[in-house]
Image: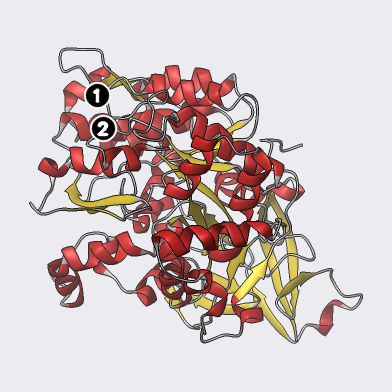
Amino acid sequence: MLIRLKGGKIYDPAQKQEGVVSDIYIRDGVIVNPPETLSLADVEYDITGKVVMAGAIDIHSHIAGGNVNTARLLLPEQHRNFLARKLNHPFSTARWSATETGYRYALMGYTTVVEPAVLPINALDAHLQMADIPIIDTAGLAILGNDDYLLRLLRTGVSQNQINDYVAWTLHATRCLGLKVINAGGANAFKSNARSFDLDDQVPEYGVSSRHILQTLQRAACEIQLPHPVHVHCNNLGIPGNVDTALATMEAAQGLPMHLAHIQFYGYGNEGERGFSTAAAKLIDGFKKHPNITMDVGQVLFAQTVTISGDVIAQYSRRHDASPNKWVAWDAECEGSGGVVPYRYKESSFVNSLQWLIGLEIFLLAEDPWRLFFTTDHPNGGPFTMYPFLIRLLMDKDYRLECMAQLNQEAVAMSLLKDLHKEFTLYDIAIMTRTAAARLLGLADRGHLMPGAVADIAVYSEQEDKAAMFGHAALVFKNGHLVVKDGEVVGRRNGTAQIVQPEFDKQIERRVQLYYDQFYNLKLDSFAVADVSFNQSDNERFLRHSCGTPYLASHS
């Protein structure tokens, strides 16, 4: 069947199309060239005057895994209130099911979402949860950097090739798209009663520094040619003065590709009477000097949410801020750790106001939407359902000023934001949330509207209120099938999981099995995602992408 989308205004940075009026044709779930006879379309949608973009891609959103489930268990009242429709504020992870997650993303025009923290030992559960999310495609990033096996390898000084094989094998076993490092070595140090952990601190009993762990894994990601750079949660999250940690991490990358996650939480200075200030300008100055670095923002937005993270040091240190007053911290022997702390961001709070301001400063100062990505670190900075409001903040300076008037004015006085008049365009939004996001992840089949791309397409009715515009898409197609119409979900489909499977020396399986025999008394197959039966066949559930040259922050 041939589908024609007629007369839309195309915003496709991959083709440098900015509001170009054109038709799009879809056949068998893929965008195709126009037929010689235009009247041959079987189905036609007249979208004259509407904005057309590729389906949006969220590169960092916690939608599955152990911490997500723990958050739901910790906050059952939020889920009950949501079901009873008693709460009139945005959704958070604790409030909705897998179905609601897929539907809410689809309504905004999102078609691919990355779960950025898959603990290898828990990968099976994470994939089962993601398989339950309808409509959207998913991907996972496998966490390494705090596992006992890797730290033992580093302590004994094995070759980089052995590290590379272990990383590649892990991605095979977990069926993930890339590699995540969370406060490298910090979770393991926490087990030895460390309550802070800097880039050059050493993990007790292993004698390896956080910097060494990070650089070794970064080199592995480059040498096995993962398309997505190593995805880094830096040390010292949320601590005043931690901008220096972020800048030191950029230097530690040594010119190789590296992605820094939720960078707003590292944009903090320690000036002023409260010892807490914005360092967004200093951060961006460093960012501009390192073209090998990409970042996502992790914008704070005012709402009740729940913070979830594998950074147990950060989560444990914030347990007294829990709202409501309950929290969870955990660690797994030989593996990682994590914590769940509910939290409400308040406009009256000096700290929360400054966090909100810093995130927007970073967005507006960066000047390169090809290297800076659109996230709230869902749910840590705010629920993903608030993305439309964030888009409006970026596109409408008058709206920003209105919102700033409601904030803690001591924080506003310290901020640069009131003097930043830049407004993002629809083209900028398309770059950050579509084309650049797909390139960063190595997903060549999406993020654009060229022939050969999967037909993931979002159509919006242009409105002055950009929150309303992006909150409810007029039409959304997933693999060429209509799933959203006039702000309502009209079709439910199974998504696929995006994976890479780099090559590795099979000897690593024997070595890891010997380790498991000693410490787990389990077989490798016990952790293999491949042995699980999904509702779809393996060929339908998993979509393999090629390894190749990592993203180099180039958009030429």
Q: Nearer the viewer, residue 216 or 347?
A: 216
- Whether residue 53 is visible here, answered yes or no, is no
Depicted 405 relative to depicted 149: above or below: above
- Find residue 549 and name its label: none
Q: From the viewer's perspective, is 408 left or right of 552?
A: left
Instruction: Find residue 184 and report its horizontal and vertical position in percent.
Output: 43, 37
Q: Nearer the viewer, residue 167 or 87?
A: 167
Q: Residue at x 83, y 84 (%)?
A: 40
| Picture quadrant of residue 280 | top left
Most distant residue in the right direction: 36
Q: Residue at x 37, y 74 (%)?
A: 98
10 Å crowding of disc 2: few (<14), some (14-19), many (20+): some
Q: Earlier in the sequence, mark 1 or mark 2?
A: 2
Residue designated by label 2: 404
10 Å crowding of disc 1: few (<14), some (14-19), many (20+): some
- Contact? badges 1 and 2 (CB < 8 Å): yes
- Number of labelled discs? 2
Residue designated by label 1: 412
| Picture quadrant of residue 398 | top left
Q: Nearer the viewer, residue 537 or 518?
A: 518
Q: Residue at x 24, y 43 (%)?
A: 315
Q: Nearer the viewer, residue 497 or 473?
A: 497
Q: Quadrant of the C terminus?
A: top right
Instruction: Find residue 193 and report its horizontal and vertical position in percent.
Output: 22, 36
Q: Quadrant of the N terminus?
A: bottom right
Q: From the viewer's perspective, is 7 left or right of 209?
A: right
Depicted 171 relative to depicted 389: above or below: below
Q: Amino acid at mark 2?
A: Met
Q: From the viewer's perspective, is 57 left or right of 39?
A: left
Q: Amino acid at mark 1?
A: Val
- Whether residue 208 is visible here, answered yes or no, is yes
Instruction: Find residue 231 and report its horizontal and vertical position in percent.
Output: 52, 43
